[in-house]
């Protein structure tokens, strides 16, 4: 009997950062894999997610490796790191994700996607710094939602739910879920798959195996690994983020902040429209 094959693509969220087990990360995808089939049925789980990955990495590196495995189920949860780079371009993000989803659907794999919260709000950045990141993440989420519908993916709405405000769900860095948060993601994905009779095993438990990190542990992370994390991203993002923040303040002073939202919405519409136009010759 051929085992059910589940391959996970993405960045640190899917890699399992925030849910340590021994010397390795576990994460929501590994927890979900345990409930995809009954205990006596084999499941082959491969996690190709890499911390820091962007949509380009998923398209050019992870997707070819995943296609070679001929998965029955594949998760593609990506996009936050794109918003944290000065190279952010919603047209490129849309084009890459469209190619990734299409490649797996062509193999008749079940594709799972998710929209995610913006990093600025999770980090508690000041408004002028947080709003540009929020605008970018909304753009990515809109694209993911639209393309998920186009390609018939199983889409999880994880960007605006009550679990986001529960501190117990999050790890010390405030960007990655802790064990409880990863379990919530696994449970929600399992419910989507079970609703279509795709997941037939027992749903992951919502109860954590390990205690929530203490405040002192969180402060220690921020003082050690956290500073390095921020420094690596600031080298690339900070100059542009300051420029974006300055634009926010100028528009706010002039009472024209709505123009920034309209511009972002137009960019998303343009990106999706461009994909539709590109598909027309094939449809003919």
Image (cartoon, rainbow, N blue to C red):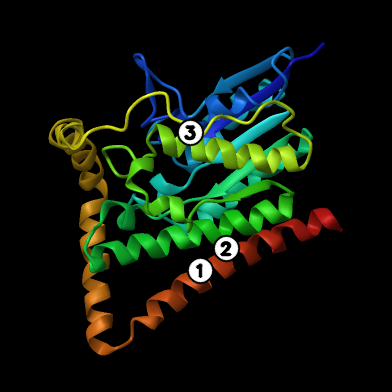
Q: Could you say whether the residue bearing mark 1 is in a helix, strand or loop?
A: helix
Whether 29 is drawn above or below 149: the answer is above
For marks 3 and 1, the one nearer the N-term is 3
Circle 1 residue: 267
Circles 1 and 2 in contact, beta carbons < 8 Å: yes
Q: Quadrant of the N terminus?
A: top right
Residue density around tag 1, few if under 14, some if 14–19, many if 20 or more, within 10 Å: some
Q: How many labels, in total?
A: 3
Q: Nearer the viewer, mark 3 or mark 1?
A: 3
Say which mark, if any, is on residue 161.
none
For marks 2 and 3, the one nearer the N-term is 3
Which residue is drawn at the image coordinates 61% and 20% (left, top)? 45
Whether 129 is drawn above or below 263: the answer is above
**Relative to 180, 246 lies left or right:** left
Circle 3 residue: 14
Which residue is drawn at the image coordinates 44% and 50% (left, top)? 163
**Relative to 191, 186 lies left or right:** left
Q: CA distance from mark 2 to mark 3?
A: 26 Å
Q: Position of residue 283 (x, y in %)?
A: 84, 56
Circle 2 residue: 271
């Amino acid at each position: 009997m051929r085992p059910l094959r589940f391959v996970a693509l993405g960045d640190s969220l899917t890699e399992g950062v925030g849910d340590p087990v021994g010397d390795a990360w576990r994460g929501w995808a590994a927890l979900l894999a345990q409930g995809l089939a009954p205990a006596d049925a084999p499941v082959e789980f491969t996690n190709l997610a890499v911390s820091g990955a962007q949509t380009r990495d998923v398209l050019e590196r992870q997707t070819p490796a995943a296609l070679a495995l001929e998965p029955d189920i594949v998760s593609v949860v990506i996009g936050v790191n794109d918003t944290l780079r000065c190279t952010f371009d919603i047209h490129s993000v849309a084009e890459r994700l469209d190619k990734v989803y299409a490649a797996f659907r062509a193999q008749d794999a079940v594709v799972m996607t998710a929209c995610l919260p913006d990093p600025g709000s999770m980090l508690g950045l000041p408004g002028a710094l947080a709003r540009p990141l929020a605008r970018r993440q909304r753009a990515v989420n809109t694209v993911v939602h639209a393309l998920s519908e186009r390609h018939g993916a199983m889409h999880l709405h994880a960007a605006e739910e009550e679990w986001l405000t529960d501190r117990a769900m999050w790890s010390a860095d405030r960007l990655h879920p802790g064990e409880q948060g990863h379990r919530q993601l696994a449970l929600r994905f399992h419910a989507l798959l079970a609703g279509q009779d795709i997941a037939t095993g027992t749903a992951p438990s919502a109860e954590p195996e390990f205690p929530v990190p203490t405040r002192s542990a969180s402060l220690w992370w921020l003082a050690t690994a956290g500073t390095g994390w921020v420094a690596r991203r600031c080298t690339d993002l900070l100059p542009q983020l300051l420029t974006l923040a300055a634009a926010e303040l100028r528009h706010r002073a002039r009472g024209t902040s709505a123009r920034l939202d309209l511009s972002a919405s137009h960019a998303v519409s343009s990106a999706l429209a461009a994909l539709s136009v590109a598909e027309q010759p094939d449809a003919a």
